[in-house]
Amino acid sequence: MTTKKMNATSEGYFVLLGFSNWPHLEVVLFVVVLVFYLMTLTGNLFIIILSYLDSHLHTPMYFFLSNLSFLDLCYTTSFIPQLLVNLWGPGKTISYTGCMIQLYFVLTLGCTECVLLMVMSYDRYAAVCRPLHYTVLMHPRFCQLLAVACWVSGFTNSALHSFFTFWVPLCGHHQVDHFFCEVPALLRLSCVDTRVNELSLMVTSSIFVLIPLILILSSYGAIAWAVLRMQSTTGLQKVFGTCGAHLMVVSLFYIPVMCIYLQPPSGNSQDQGKFIALFYTVVTPSLNPLIYTLRNRDVRGAVKRLMG
């Protein structure tokens, strides 16, 4: 096993094939990815800075939103610069160590986002369904503990998968048929049976995707029931404004992730999987700030106060 492993990585790098099957698309994709990356950087930094500077936004909702923005910044930065380099030039290599680091952080941040979106839905549930107890339920110290739990769960799950993935012996060649290092693409390079790895990936994906999704839908079921009993039009508008934005973000993230990770590798064509992954890794993080801020009165008020 060790010999095969050394043969596969003796040159110290992997080749990320990415979108090399469509060379005429690479320049277009470079521009599109660069634009969305700049949008991600600008929009998420704007939310973090605004939430920090304006005391009116020192609430649980904007604390978790700042965490989400920081997470999206880290997530996109963990692989987009490498993707842009590969799209622009003929060289599409990544060092073995770089691939290990990229895999670890992409997995960490993806799992953390799944759990964080669930926590954000609980915050909305507490605000709408338990308004009189909201300040007790979402005490600042408890919010900090929830945020830490999200990050720790992501780092722990990623450490396990990264360890087991990089101990799988590879078959000599080192061409990864994806635009970043991820578990299913690396398992395809193996020359041994990887059903145990695939099963563990599906089980943990179910834990980190399906369970949070079920809890999110349960929270919004309770919120919908509370909204139906509301008499105030202003209250309805505020609930739809904040909860609608969160539901849209959840949909944009969870639907593509389920298409990729909650089915066997053979159930999805690799080319189709690349474009689905491109959407939830590049497009979704850039849309989150727009979704949360465009129709948000709190943010507009904060901007006006900041501008004097």
Image: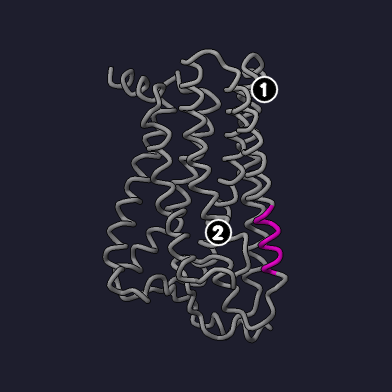
Q: Which numbered dot is residue 63?
A: none
Element type at marker 1? helix
Q: Position of residue 195 (x, y in %)?
A: 70, 73
Q: Is residue 92 above or below residue 162?
A: below
Identify which amino acid the numbered label 2 is placed on.
Cys
Cα distance, mark 1 to mark 2?
Answer: 35 Å
Q: Along the horizontal axis of the image, is 83 left or right of 117?
A: left
Looking at the rendered image, the disc whose residue lies closer to the viewer, 1 or 2, is 2
Number of numbered markers: 2
* Residue that extends furthest to the right in the rendered view of this protein: 196
Helix, strand or loop at disc 2? helix
Segment tinted magenta in the rendering: 197-206
> Which image quadrant for residue 116?
top right
In this rendering, the answer to whether 47 lies above or below 151 is above
Q: Is residue 236 left or right of residue 25?
A: right
The residue drawn where x is 30% and y is 52% is 35
Return the residue at label 1: 137
Between 201 and 100, the residue placed more toward the observer is 201
Quickly name the residue at label 2: 259
Foreground of the two, 217 or 10: 217
Q: Nearer the viewer, residue 96 or 245?
A: 245
Query: Mark 1–mark 2 contact, CB under 8 Å?
Result: no
